[in-house]
Amino acid sequence: MSTQSISAANPVDKSLPEVTGVKGVYLWAANLNCIGMGMLRLGLVIVLLWIGGLKFASYEADSIVPLVANSPLASFLYHYPAPEYRKYMNKEGEAIPDHQQWHESNGTYPVSYGLGAIIILLGLLIALHPLFPQVAAVGSFLLIGMSCVTLSFLFTTPEAWVPALGDAHHGFPYLSGVGRLIIKDCIMLGAAIVTMADSARAYLKPEA
């Protein structure tokens, strides 16, 4: 297999006549693929490490309860079935001892800590691309799986949609704050696929 066939993107042929004007702008843009890939990977790492770290904060652990409790794939992680959690939800920055005690007995915090550790691990694996691209490819592959699970919450979490409280705009397709947060994982999924492919190519590319 030739080096050209496995390159991330064929570079612009330097032998082509010099172009100016609008086409020159497109030529400049076409040469940004390497910078773009680096920024994409860096963005993934920053988001994963930051969000993973926040999973160790109680307010973040509380906020994911509706997602996990209503999911057929993850509800077994908690001790109490949905929708019991609704009586014990805390607003961000709010600390109600009775609610926190319920979350402790529900297993809310250990589940969040475990999820945070996994997310941080994925970020670290992807960050290893310059040294071990094969490891980074595995990290991106695992992130694909995590993104698919997260997107499934859109179909299982009632709180993902605007409730019928009087406004004519409720239910599908009107995403609530929770739903808008979930739908952004479509971008995460695409970024994971692209970085996995790039890391795999870097691993397979023959050494010069």
Image (tube, grey):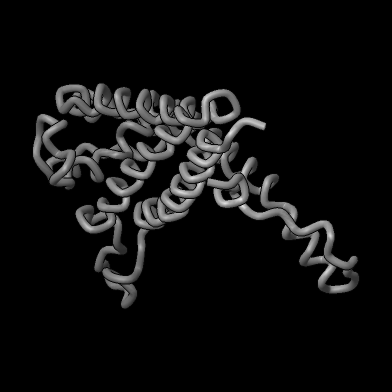
Whole-percent x, y for residue 33 in the image: 67, 51
Residue lying at 26% horizontally and 54% vertically, measured from the top left: 159
125 above or below 30? above
Residue 207 falls in image quadrant:
top right
Residue lying at 82% horizontally and 66% vertically, measured from the top left: 25
Towards the viewer: 149 or 168: 149
185 above or below 48? below
Whether residue 186 sits left or right of residue 85 in the image: it is right
130 above or below 4? above
Towards the viewer: 187 or 22: 22
Farthest residue in the front direction?
A: 1
Whether residue 129 sits left or right of residue 54 in the image: it is right
Instruction: Let me know if residue 93 appears in the view.
Output: no
Residue 28 falls in image quadrant:
bottom right
Towards the viewer: 183 or 125: 125
Whole-percent x, y for residue 203 in the image: 52, 33
Whole-percent x, y for residue 204 in the image: 51, 37
Farthest residue in the bottom direction?
A: 168
Quarter containing the C terminus: top right
Instruction: Let me know if residue 176 appears in the view.
Output: yes
203 above or below 155? above
Figure label count: 0
Towards the viewer: 205 or 69: 205
Residue lying at 41% horizontally and 55% vertically, measured from the top left: 186
Whole-percent x, y for residue 176 in the image: 36, 59
